[in-house]
Image (cartoon, grey):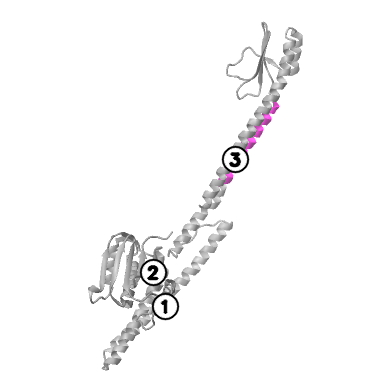
Amino acid sequence: MSISKKIAVLFLISFVLMSIIGFWIDNINSKRIDDLIKEKYLKIANELLLNIDNKSKIDELLKKYQLKPLNSIKKQNEILYEKTHTFGFVSIQKESFEDEFILHINFLDEHLILKTPDEQNINDKLQLNALIFLDIFILILTFAYILKLLYPLKSITKEIENFSHGNLSSRINITSNDEIGTLAKTFNSMASTLENLITTREELLRDIGHELRTPIAKGKFALEKIDDFSQKELLKKIFKDLETLTNELLELEKLNSSKLHFSTFSAETLILEALSKLYINDESNIQLYIKEDFRITGDLHYLCLALKNIIDNALKYATCLPVTIEATAHSICVSNHGNPLVKELEHYLKPFTQERQERDGFGLGLSIVNKVMHKHQFHLSYAFQNHQNHFTLFFVKKM
């Protein structure tokens, strides 16, 4: 879960709790105030009821308690208290959204409808409610401000991902003076340094590759002038090995920095492209079974190179032919009859690692396969069953 989602969850929990607490406090205060008001005006109502036939006393009480006579009562008033007596009744009512109360006193033919002054208790309650709503409003503002502070992290994450995928020119355009701005500046500085190092290394490798190919080509040309057949074949093999090593080293280095060019193609296309890059004199040395021709999204060139290396190793290390290639659900398995690997697969995924030193090659094949699969987030597995080595390429991204 992202930081923004975690903060949103915490905000919702805080908002709900604060709303519940505010509602609960409001109910308690309302009940407490209503009880106090009812008790206060019930005494006043009883005093008025006892003196209802004494007009001067009534006027004195009205002045004392600041009560104002009314002509009528609204039907929608909330009744807080009502009690019927032998010759009349007493009622205490409250108008909606008002701070005053209504006293309705009836005795025989006498009616008193009186309006009370504003109650300070109710004003205090409204102030308390206003403070609660202010707290909620501040909570919302705080949540919005935190999201604003964290928003640049999305841009930082995106640019770091782009950089990790090979876009060395990715930079973070944030100029704030806080910790996030410092992080952006530090990343930009690091990215510039790495870009310069990688660019310099690529240029150096290209120069080395060019300089190596030139003497190799000259050496091959000079070989044609040598008459001694045995010396000529030995030198041919030496130059061929040098050329192969140069090409594999350059290809391995390209994988570290080059961007993948994604397209969608079938498993059959990948297998046929890989086979076309191999020099197979006898087609019966390969048995192909496409049980499920699934779709693959990736760089056809590099995936083809990886599968070619697996097939080439299978042919090279087989004790007897044919080599089997089988395509099933999202995987291609290359199997051969041969001896099992002496060590774990991870050992052979390192550069210049071979099962047997007397074999042709330089131990870069599986290292290239591993890098190609890793860049695609696919994976390679190995198993030895029924006297056969099974190397399987899985074209499903690892979780």
Is residue 142 covered in magenta? yes
Is residue 136 covered in magenta? yes
Q: Is residue 275 above or below residue 178?
A: below
How far apart are the two marked residues, 3 and 2, measured between alpha carbons? 55 Å
Would you name the residue on which mark 1 appears? 353
> For residue 17, which numbered disc appears in the image?
3
How far apart are the two marked residues, 3 and 1, measured between alpha carbons? 63 Å
Mark nearer the N terminus (1 vs 2): 1
Would you name the residue on which mark 2 appears? 382
Q: Amino acid at mark 3?
A: Leu
Nearer the observer, 78 or 343: 343
Q: Residue at x 33, y 77 (%)?
A: 317
How far apart are the two marked residues, 1 and 2, measured between alpha carbons? 16 Å
**Residue, far top:** 109
* Of the two numbered discs 3 and 2 in the rendering, the one whose residue sits closer to the viewer: 2
Q: Which residues are magenta?
A: 119-144
Tell me residue 228's x, y (percent): 27, 94
* Of the two numbered discs 3 and 1 in the rendering, the one whose residue sits closer to the viewer: 1
Nearer the observer, 117 or 188: 117
Can you tell which quarter of the image residue 389 is in?
A: bottom left
Q: Amino acid at mark 2?
A: Tyr
Mark nearer the N terminus (3 vs 1): 3
